[in-house]
Amino acid sequence: MPRGSCPVAIEAAGPAAARATIAAYTEAGHDVIPIRGPLAMNTVAGAIASWDAALAHLQAAWRSTVLARLLRDAGHYANEGVAVTFSQVLSTTTKFDEVAHQPGFAERFLPNGKILRSALYFANPSSPGFSTTGQGRLGQLLSRRTGRKDRRGFSGPSGALLSIDDLNEYQPRVCQPLAD
């Protein structure tokens, strides 16, 4: 923050999807929430929305040239990619049987059907950017994946409970911190 300004807090815990109910999971044949797959996607990404709120707050307080410098590295990695880490390879290898069949995983994280190797450069050309509202790129991406209904009335191509309405109704709150 600029010198002399007061700190702020951003309350951004994303709420559960409106349709994420016990009845919805029971109807889908689950007695617990699955840890993977479309029915596990059941909360608004509040952390990402907090970045939007922080960005708006900073834009009001700082010159755009300073803000551009703060975001330069993040923008570079979002657009150009990152080095594949050993922990990413280890996680993909150990959880392969859980995640390989999940919608979109193989296309995004298994180029040519193979687990990435450490030290390679991994670019995600469909990086959605910061915004989680329906108007933002991430919101638009999620709405394409969650905007259609299946035979049970769940939205999404494979039954996700999170909807574009959940994203549009959510707003993080800039507030005073508990202590200065």
Image: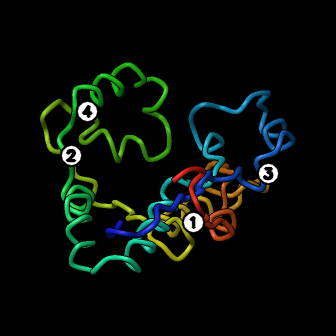
Of the residues shown, which amino acid type is indicated by label 3? Arg
Of the residues shown, which amino acid type is indicated by label 2? Phe
Closer to the eye: label 1 or 2: 1
Gap in angstroms between the C-alphas marked 1 and 3? 38 Å
51 horizontally vs 133: left or right: left
Check disc 4 and report its element: helix, strand or loop: loop
Q: Residue at x 66, y 47 (%)?
A: 42
Q: Is residue 26 above or below residue 129?
A: above
Q: Which residue is mark 4?
A: 114
Q: Position of residue 80 (x, y in %)?
A: 18, 58
Q: Quadrant of the N terminus?
A: bottom left
| Visual colour scheme | rainbow
Question: Badge 3: how crowded within 10 Å, few (<14), some, or many (20+)?
Answer: few
Looking at the image, tell me whether mark 4 or mark 3 is earlier in sequence order: 4
Closer to the eye: label 3 or 2: 2
Looking at the image, tell me whether mark 2 or mark 4 is earlier in sequence order: 4
Q: Position of residue 153 (x, y in %)?
A: 78, 56
180 horizontally vs 3: left or right: right
Closer to the eye: label 1 or 4: 1
Of the residues shown, which amino acid type is indicated by label 1? Val
Gap in angstroms between the C-alphas marked 3 and 2? 37 Å
Looking at the image, tell me whether mark 3 or mark 2 is earlier in sequence order: 2
Question: Badge 1: how crowded within 10 Å, few (<14), some, or many (20+)?
Answer: some
Spot the residue most to the left. 119
Closer to the eye: label 2 or 4: 2
Q: Which residue is mark 1?
A: 174
Q: Which residue is mark 3?
A: 152
Gap in angstroms between the C-alphas marked 1 and 4? 43 Å
15 horizontally vs 79: left or right: right
Gap in angstroms between the C-alphas marked 2 and 4? 13 Å
Q: Position of residue 141 (x, y in %)?
A: 48, 64
Q: Which residue is mark 2?
A: 122
